[in-house]
């Protein structure tokens, strides 16, 4: 039986993982912004944005490992590239300097947004902007993580009528404390489509255009605020709020931001705020 060559496996793994990285990189280049992808439940070939990103990351890891072994097996050749005719090791020889400068040009060109590097980024943004027009933007960040109760309150919709509209359209798993994402997943639709079903719910009495009841304040930039700072700003007891989260099996400390707590719990920052209040 012919012996398997580990060296050949390493080289071919480097090649195949590199080709797959190109493919996933192209997908991630054209994928919509996260807020759009999550809201419209964007898929390509059955995979979500997060799934494509996860595959790309692990393929990159495989490529790095294979490349490390490739360098190991070709170390003598690499060292030869760094030696002059007298067999003296010179790291910054002409070839290495050119390779270093090429990489540096790409870094600086991207940082200063000059053509053609800036052009590549501009095309990327134009693709994403076109997708925003196609799929639509959520009314606010991570709206799909909001419970139906919180979403209606923020959007100025009547919760009871929203429930009637959802049930009228035979949606399953509907509940006041269910997130739009969960309702969408149970029914095989996007969070955006859930919103389309309830957007005609009549406005609540005394609701302003911002979605807040008269005399109340809807927090802005909540995701960046720490729980401790928000407790002082919006006048609620921090320890009681954290205890309420703990009863819901949500771990939090005063120094954590609402985004950190919400991301760990799979919720929207506004829902964490509402729980603590």
Image: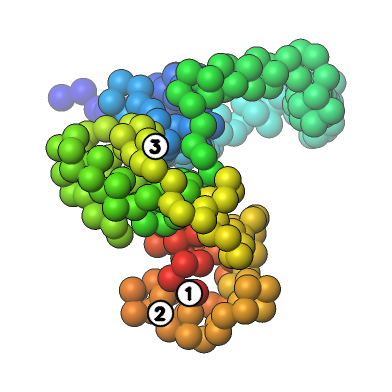
- Specify the label residue 14 is tagged with: none
| Mark 2 lies on residue | 244
Q: Quadrant of residue 7?
A: top left
- Callout 2 touching callout 1 (CB < 8 Å): yes
Residue 113 in sight here: yes
Q: Residues within 10 Å of mark 1 (few under 14, many from 20)?
A: some
Which residue does the image show at 64% across and 22% down from the upper left? 125
Which residue does the image show at 26% across and 48% down from the upper left? 163
Q: On screen, 181 above or below 259? A: above
Q: Earlier in the sequence, mark 3 or mark 1?
A: 3
- Callout 3 touching callout 1 (CB < 8 Å): no
Residue closer to the observer: 105 or 173: 173
- Specify the label residue 199 is tagged with: 3
Q: Residues within 10 Å of mark 2 (few under 14, many from 20)?
A: some
Q: Nearer the viewer, mark 2 or mark 3?
A: 3
Question: How far apart are labels 2 and 1 at the CA level?
Answer: 6 Å
Question: How far apart are labels 2 and 3 at the CA level?
Answer: 31 Å
Q: On screen, 110 above or below 245? A: above
Q: Earlier in the sequence, mark 2 or mark 1?
A: 2
Question: Is 88 left, or right, of 219 in this rendering?
Answer: right
Residue 24 picture location, percent across and down: 44, 24
Q: Secondary structure at mark 1?
A: helix
Q: Quadrant of the N terminus?
A: top left
Q: Secondary structure at mark 2?
A: helix
Residue closer to the observer: 267 or 54: 267
Q: Residues within 10 Å of mark 3 (few under 14, many from 20)?
A: some
């Amino acid at each position: 039986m012919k012996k398997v060559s580990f060296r050949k496996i390493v080289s071919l793994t480097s090649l195949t993982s590199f080709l797959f990285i190109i493919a996933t990189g192209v997908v991630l280049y054209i994928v919509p912004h996260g807020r759009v992808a999550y809201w419209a439940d964007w898929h390509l070939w059955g995979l979500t944005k997060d799934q494509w990103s996860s595959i790309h990351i692990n393929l990159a890891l495989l490529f790095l490992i294979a490349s490390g072994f490739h360098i190991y097996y070709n170390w003598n050749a690499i060292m030869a590239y760094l030696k002059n005719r007298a067999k003296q090791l010179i790291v910054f020889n002409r070839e290495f300097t050119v390779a270093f400068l090429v990489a540096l040009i790409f870094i600086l060109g991207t940082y200063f947004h000059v053509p053609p590097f800036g052009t590549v980024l501009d095309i990327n943004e134009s693709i994403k902007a076109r997708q925003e027009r196609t799929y639509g933007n959520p009314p606010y960040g991570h709206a799909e993580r909001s419970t139906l109760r919180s979403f209606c309150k923020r959007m100025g919709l009547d919760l009871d009528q929203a429930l009637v509209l959802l049930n009228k359209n035979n949606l399953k798993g509907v509940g006041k404390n269910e997130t739009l994402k969960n309702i969408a997943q149970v029914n095989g639709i996007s969070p955006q489509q859930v919103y389309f079903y309830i957007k005609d719910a009549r406005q609540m009495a005394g609701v302003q255009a911002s979605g807040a009841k008269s005399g109340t304040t809807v927090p802005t930039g909540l995701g960046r605020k720490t729980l401790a700072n928000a407790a002082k700003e919006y006048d609620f007891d921090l320890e009681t709020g954290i205890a309420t989260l703990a009863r819901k099996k949500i771990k939090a400390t005063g120094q954590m931001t609402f985004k950190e707590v919400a991301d760990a719990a799979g919720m929207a920052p506004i829902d964490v705020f509402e729980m603590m209040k």
